[in-house]
Amino acid sequence: HPQARHIREEELGLTPARLRGIQESTGEILVFVDDDNVLDADYLEWVVRLADDWPMIGAFGGQVRPEFEEEPPEWTREYWQRLAIREFKQDKWSNVPGLDDTTPYGAGLCVRQRVAGEYLAYHVNGKRKFVLDRAGASLLSAGDVDLAATACDIGLGNGLFTSLKLTHLIPRERVEENYLLRLLEAQAFSGIVLSSFRSHGATPKRLGWKTIAADQLRILLMDRKKRRIFRALRNGQKEALKFLSNGL
């Protein structure tokens, strides 16, 4: 492309790279594409068309199909959505921030410039004191959810459209049990911290004794894999609550 540029961001991590991209951008619509994403040939054409047809939508995305390096074990299928895999048959939209059914993932995420500008301001003004995204070996996430939810903060909505399609290249190690355990724990941690950001700093309540007792009963009925996954999710939540109680 005649206007293509490569920009180097010295600070490690997805969030610094995303913020740098926002600062450098000049277009009305920003499209975020990871290095393991392959956009369909008509993806950008559809982005322009949808942005024109849906002026009330501030952040939107589409279908994310997997291309696995090796066929993953069948038991992993129920966790594929955690790998940003999403396929659906009808368009969806809402103005409810963080709603699973309508919140676009970071893969192929499209946002209007004013949404991106508001998100950048959150970081510049100190409203986001902790980075909720990948950096080095960390598997923290939710920065994309926060960015999409920012559209709702300024009176716009989120949308998912069937016409937007990309392929997510997934190496074999990302569907191994140990990786998924780390990922789920990090996502649970990130979700609690993001909730704190979006409730103006309020710290979510710790798990009560009834919940803890019910957890112990659930664990007894689970097989080994389910038990490890459940504990990873709970560990992530507990670590996040501990982190928030100590102050950001």
Image (cartoon, rainbow, N blue to C red):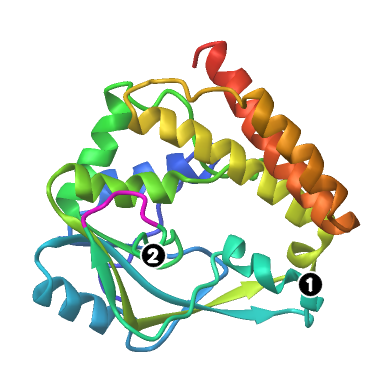
Query: Would residue 111 be found to the left or right of residue 196 on screen?
Result: left
Name which of mark 2 and mark 1 comes first in the sequence.
1
Span colored in magenta: 95-99
Q: Nearer the viewer, residue 50 or 230?
A: 230
Residue 20, horizontal then vertical, whole percent: 36, 43
The answer to if 21 sits in the magenta stretch is: no
| Residue receiving disc 2 | 101
Q: Quadrant of residue 77?
A: bottom right
Q: Secondary structure at mark 2?
A: loop
Q: Which mark is residue 169?
A: none
Q: Please name the residue shown 44% across and 44% down the image.
A: 143
Q: Please name the residue shown 24% across and 32% down the image.
A: 121
Residue 113 in sight: yes
**Most prominent secondary structure in the magenta stretch?**
loop
Residue 71, horizontal then vertical, whole percent: 78, 82
Query: Would residue 64 be found to the left or right of residue 230 on screen?
Result: left
Q: Nearer the viewer, residue 213 or 225?
A: 213
Q: Please name the residue shown 25% across and 82% down the image.
A: 46
Q: Looking at the image, is 39 positioned above or below residue 188? A: below
Residue 177, horizontal then vertical, whole percent: 83, 59
Q: Secondary structure at mark 1?
A: helix
Q: Please name the residue shown 70% across and 79% down the image.
A: 68
Question: Which residue is the extreme one toward the top?
Answer: 246
Q: Looking at the image, is 94 positioned above or below residue 41? A: above
Specify the amino acid type for callout 1. Trp
Residue 79, horizontal then vertical, whole percent: 66, 65
| Residue receiving disc 1 | 75
